[in-house]
Image (tube, rainbow, N blue to C red):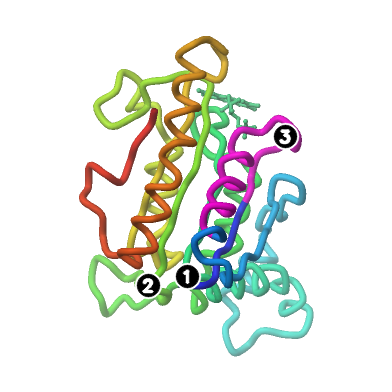
Amino acid sequence: MNHLLQIDASARRGRSLTRQLTNAFVAQWLYRQPDAVVTRRDVGAEPPPAVSEEWIAAAFAGAERNAEQCELLALSDRLIDEVEAADLILIGAPMYNYGMPAALKAWFDQIIRIDRTFSFDLGRGDKPLEPMLSGKQVVVLSSWGEFGFEPGGQNAMHNHLVPHIRTCSRYLGAKSFDALAIEYQEFGDDRHEASKLQAFDGIPALVERLQQTDGALAPPDAMLSFG
Ligand SMILES: Cc1cc2nc3c(=O)[nH]c(=O)nc-3n(C[C@H](O)[C@H](O)[C@H](O)COP(=O)(O)O)c2cc1C
């Protein structure tokens, strides 16, 4: 449990709440495990390109892939190498239009790739895709302007962020998935302050649990906590 991959996806540099959360998480992790290695990938500052027709052809070219196509996949290879090397993948994911920022989606599109992170075999019947990575902890630290996006909350049906990342995290090799979020950012009122406090206060316990369990599955109701 020594290698963290920190992904930040906010377009905001200075005032970003998700960046504050991921930095607090990493600081707490290093406090408890000073020899941990941290790799940072800032997709908010440097968004990976959207995949193109040529990129898709290169990804599916297999053994026939030519030099130009290899070059086209070079960034994807590097991003996948970073995921492969990590024990824990920490994603700072702001909610944009009820889902993930385009830059983060572009990162997932670069990473979820045939014969690198999933295999495809129609011999498996109705479930031909199989993840190739395993054993990783995935943590999503989020922030949104509205509220009630937790399971059962009044806006749960509009939360296309956490459930989407959770589904995709299977192809990052997730053996566990945790998420917490700051709410009410757009209101900037006491509820926002309380939610911020709750989220930051939740980080030490989350880090402690993840380090202790080494990614053993948490009880389902402990996995998603939006303050
Ligand atoms: C482009 C954009 C779209 C947003 N869409 C939503 C949204 O659909 N729902 C919501 O609750 N908040 C939305 N917000 C508010 C952000 O989720 C909130 O400001 C959050 O704190 C952003 O993360 P950051 O502080 O790390 O930048 C949006 C903000 C931006 C900039």
Instruction: Tell me which residue sits at (28%, 32%) in the image.
Output: 151
Closer-to-camera residue (139/105): 139
Instruction: Tell me which residue sits at (72%, 34%) in the image.
Output: 12
Tell me if 71 is positioned left or right of 182 in this view.
right
Q: Which stretch is magenta?
A: 8-29
Q: CA distance from mark 1 to mark 2?
A: 7 Å
Asked where in the image residue 38 lies, by quadrant, the reply is: bottom right
Tell me if 59 is positioned left or right of 207 in this view.
right
Q: Secondary structure at mark 2?
A: loop
Image location of residue 62, percent across then percent down: 57, 83
Q: Is residue 216 above or below residue 165?
A: below
Asked where in the image residue 58 lies, by quadrant, the reply is: bottom right
Whether label 3 touches label 2, CB < 8 Å: no
| Mark 3 crowd level (few <14, some 14–19, many ≥20, 10 Å Cα) | some
Residue type at the position of mark 1: Asp
Which residue is the site of mark 3?
12
Q: CA distance from mark 3 to mark 2?
A: 31 Å
Which residue is the site of mark 2?
135
Which badge, 3 or 2, is on the more N-terminal residue?
3
Which badge, 1 or 2, is on the more N-terminal residue?
1
Q: Is residue 49 above or below residue 134?
A: above
Q: Quadrant of ligand 1?
A: top right
Q: Quick check: is 18 in the magenta stretch?
A: yes
Which residue is the site of mark 1?
87
Residue type at the position of mark 3: Arg
Residue type at the position of mark 2: Gly
